[in-house]
Amino acid sequence: MGRGKVILERIENKINRQVTFSKRRNGLIKKAYELSVLCDAEVALILFSSRGKLFEFGSTDVGKTLQRYRQCCYALQENSTGNEDGSQDLYQEVTKLTAKYESLQRSQRNILGEDLGGLSLKELQKIEKQLDRTLSQVRQRKMHVISEKIDDLRKKERDISEENKQLKAQLLDGQYLSLVEGVGGLNQQANGTHNHKNNKVQSSKIISQPSLQIGLEPYLQQEKALDSRTVQGGSSNPIEDWLL
């Protein structure tokens, strides 16, 4: 027949209890060693007997393993506490934002003239002052924008005026140069015409002088002949000679 189920309970006999502890302790240490070798695990085993005697086993160092254990436990506790605190803070933040959103929605409806029936006189006066401040700010902003636009237009006007002055100056310079060139051309033409006329006059003088001398030559000869006849005849009056 097979072995029946062993009931786990405290061994009353001290000697048997001590023997069982010794056997099971050695078997537990052996298993821990095998686990560390086979699985490359960091194992630490701590045992206290009923008399308070310490027994320990560590694959590396029990002290280092315990320190690592404390760090892991502390980190887990911190993460758990932090998650709980973070969830609580997030819930409170969401609640505040929801209340603020509802308040803003209500204020917006009141400003638009809606849901005014349940408001008191003080609340209505508060909304009125808020509207006055808003209207004043809107007017100030509008005047500022208008002033900026006017300044921009004035600046554009000054730029256009300056550009027109420059263009006008360039146009006047161009007209003056054209006028000077035209006057110079007329002077050159006039000088050319005058020189041409002078050349013609001089040429006519040079040509007409011989003909003038040729035309006077017979007259001079007649005068000389008349003078010679007057001297020979003794008469000083050629008319008398002609009458005779």
Image (cartoon, rainbow, N blue to C red):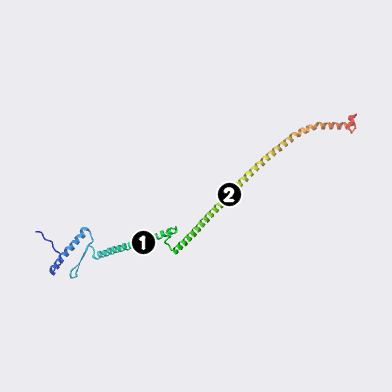
Decide: few, some or many residues near mark 2? Use Cα within 10 Å; few <14, some 14-19, many ≥20.
Answer: few
Question: Image check: 212 left or right of 61?
Answer: right
- Which image quarter is the C terminus in? top right
Question: Image check: 99 left or right of 38?
Answer: right
Relative depth, front residue between 194 and 94: 94
Residue type at mark 2? Asn
Rendered residue at 73%/35% (across/down): 204
Tell me which numbered mark, 2 or 1, is placed earlier along the sequence: 1
Rendered residue at 20%/60% (across/down): 35
> Residue 100, image x and y in percent?
39, 61
Question: Image check: 114 left or right of 75?
Answer: right
> Residue 23, image x and y in percent?
15, 65
Relative depth, front residue between 39 and 230: 39
**Which dot marks residue 95?**
1
The residue indicated by pointer 2 is: 164
Relative depth, front residue between 212 and 125: 125
> Residue 153, image x and y in percent?
54, 53
Quadrant of res 29: bottom left
The answer for how far apart the CA atoms under marks 2 and 1 are is 66 Å
| Outermost bottom residue | 51
Indicate the secondary structure of the residue bearing disc 2. Answer: helix
In this rendering, which labeled residue sits more in front, label 2 or label 1?
1
**Which dot marks residue 1?**
none
Relative depth, front residue between 64 and 95: 95
> Residue 149, image x and y in percent?
52, 54
Indicate the secondary structure of the residue bearing disc 1. Answer: helix
> Mark 2 near mark 1, Cβ–Cβ under 8 Å?
no
Rendered residue at 88%/31% (across/down): 239
Check the image and report above or below for 187 versus 156. above
Residue type at mark 1? Thr
